């Protein structure tokens, strides 16, 4: 009937088992749910951070597009008079260090002016002699699209004549008194290597174990911040895995989300936010072990609480089993002695529960049996005499 020989140990085993199994099951399910929710929250917060960085970059680019559009709306630009344009563009460069040149085209796509921040113009010979068909296709297409759609446009990253990564922003120039008739276009280029471009990332707060970078569709690093990656990292050619499957950082189906990357033999958790307008992507990463450090600390606290709960359950089980086992063992001992004809020993146990009533009834029974045995012994002695 029992697993163990002693009632006390059987009761203790029963209560500990009855208390521990539900506690362990509830704790396990709670732990799994807490871990899942905390992990999800950590990932979501970092994905939001990547989205905010992307939004910030696009906001700054939109600001630059508005600046160039505002320049194109100035009367001096609409005249296509190089001397009048030069003074205005010179002031524009003073206010905005992001751009390193300004090209002015008429509606036919002929270059009408070109200016540089320093004033020296080594390409003046191209004026009136160069058309959009003679510039890099990425730039030409951006300028044509700007005039056709009558709004500022931004190009994908391209390699300029100095072998540097750059982007081009183009804005239409409208005729006097009209906001629908395009008479030409402005285009300006910005080098990714310039410190002006790095300010896209300067405002972002990073921990010592975090890094952030922008890569183009060829995985070339355009700009980066962070101490745990080599400062001269030219390409982010590390394997990236999403949902356990190897994936590309940026492709036609790329979506914002979390991934795991093996960076120089180290497992990193990375958050990717594609910037389709620039055909590039933002990557925010940190070592995998540190990404969930806080989560593991919380889990350890929960496990300690579970352990203390088990100790408490064991202590309560021992207390209850002791309270139940003592009268049962006393009754069993009393029955054993009664079976041997010893009725004089009273069981010491007082309680108002069923066990207390059973002990009281047993004491009354043994008292009566003891009295009967004394009387029977007396008369036997009497008859013997």
Image (cartoon, rainbow, N blue to C red):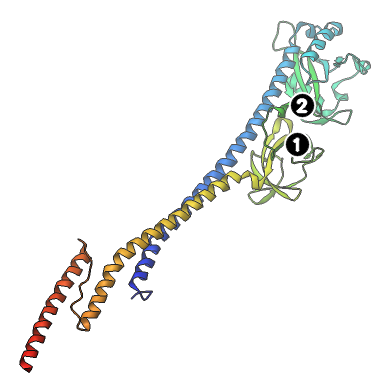
Give above or below for 152 relative to 281: above
Of 197 and 66, the residue lying toward us: 197
Q: Which mark is residue 298?
A: none
Mark 2: secondary structure: helix
Residue sitting at 82 percent across and 17 percent down? 102
Q: Quadrant of residue 310?
A: bottom left
* Point 39% across, 67% down: residue: 13
Number of the label disc, if any, that sits on residue 197: 2
Q: Which badge, 1 or 2, comes first in the chain's sequence? A: 2
In percent of width and height, residue 38 lies at 54, 44
- Towards the viewer: 292 or 314: 314
Q: Residue at x 22, y 82 (%)?
A: 339
Distance from label 1 to label 2 (Cα)? 13 Å
Q: Which residue is mark 1?
A: 215
Evaluate if marks 1 and 2 touch, with contact meaning CB atoms under 8 Å apart. no
* Left or right of 263 on screen, residue 124: right
Q: Which quadrant: the C terminus?
A: bottom left
* Of labels 1 and 2, the one closer to you: 2
**Residue 151 visible here:** no
Q: Quadrant of the N terminus?
A: bottom left
Q: Please identify the quarter of the rendering in which residue 9 is found.
A: bottom left
Q: Is residue 266 left or right of residue 366?
A: right
- Choose between 348 and 361: the one closer to the eye: 348
Q: Residues within 10 Å of mark 2 (few under 14, many from 20)?
A: some
Circle 1 SS class: strand
Q: Which one is nearer the viewer's eye here, 241 or 77?
A: 241
């Amino acid at each position: 009937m029992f697993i163990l020989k002693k009632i006390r140990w059987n009761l203790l085993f029963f209560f500990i088992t009855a208390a521990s199994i539900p506690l362990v099951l509830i704790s396990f399910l709670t732990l799994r749910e807490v871990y899942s929710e905390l992990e999800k929250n950590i990932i979501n917060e970092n994905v939001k951070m990547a989205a905010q960085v992307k939004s910030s970059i696009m906001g700054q680019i939109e600001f630059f597009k508005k600046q160039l559009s505002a320049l194109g709306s100035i009367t001096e630009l609409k005249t296509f008079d190089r001397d009048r344009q030069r003074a205005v563009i010179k002031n524009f460069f003073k206010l905005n260090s992001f751009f390193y040149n300004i090209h002015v085209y008429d509606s036919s796509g002929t270059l009408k002016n070109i200016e540089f921040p320093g004033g020296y113009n080594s390409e003046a010979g191209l004026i009136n002699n160069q058309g959009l068909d003679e510039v890099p296709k990425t730039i030409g297409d951006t300028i044509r699209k700007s005039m056709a759609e009558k709004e500022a446009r931004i190009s994908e990253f391209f390699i300029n004549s100095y072998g540097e990564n750059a982007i081009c922003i183009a804005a239409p120039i409208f005729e006097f008194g009209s906001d629908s008739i395009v008479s030409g276009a402005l285009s300006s280029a910005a080098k990714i290597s310039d410190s002006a471009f790095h300010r896209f990332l300067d405002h972002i707060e990073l921990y010592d174990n975090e890094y952030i970078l922008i890569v183009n569709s060829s995985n070339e690093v355009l700009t980066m911040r962070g101490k745990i990656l080599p400062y001269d990292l030219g390409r982010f050619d590390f394997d990236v895995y999403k949902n356990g499957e190897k994936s590309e950082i940026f492709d036609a189906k790329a979506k914002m989300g979390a991934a795991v990357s093996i960076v120089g033999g180290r497992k990193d958790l990375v958050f990717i936010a594609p910037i389709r307008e620039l055909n590039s992507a933002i990557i925010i990463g940190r070592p995998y072990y540190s990404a969930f450090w806080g989560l593991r600390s919380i889990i350890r606290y929960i496990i300690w609480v579970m352990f203390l709960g088990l100790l408490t359950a064991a202590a309560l089980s021992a207390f209850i089993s002791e309270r139940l086992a003592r009268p049962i063992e006393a009754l069993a001992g009393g029955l054993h002695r009664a079976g041997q004809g010893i009725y004089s020993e009273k069981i010491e146990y007082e309680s108002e529960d069923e066990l207390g009533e059973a002990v009281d009834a047993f004491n009354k029974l043994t008292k009566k049996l003891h009295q009967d045995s004394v009387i029977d012994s007396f008369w036997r002695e009497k008859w013997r005499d």
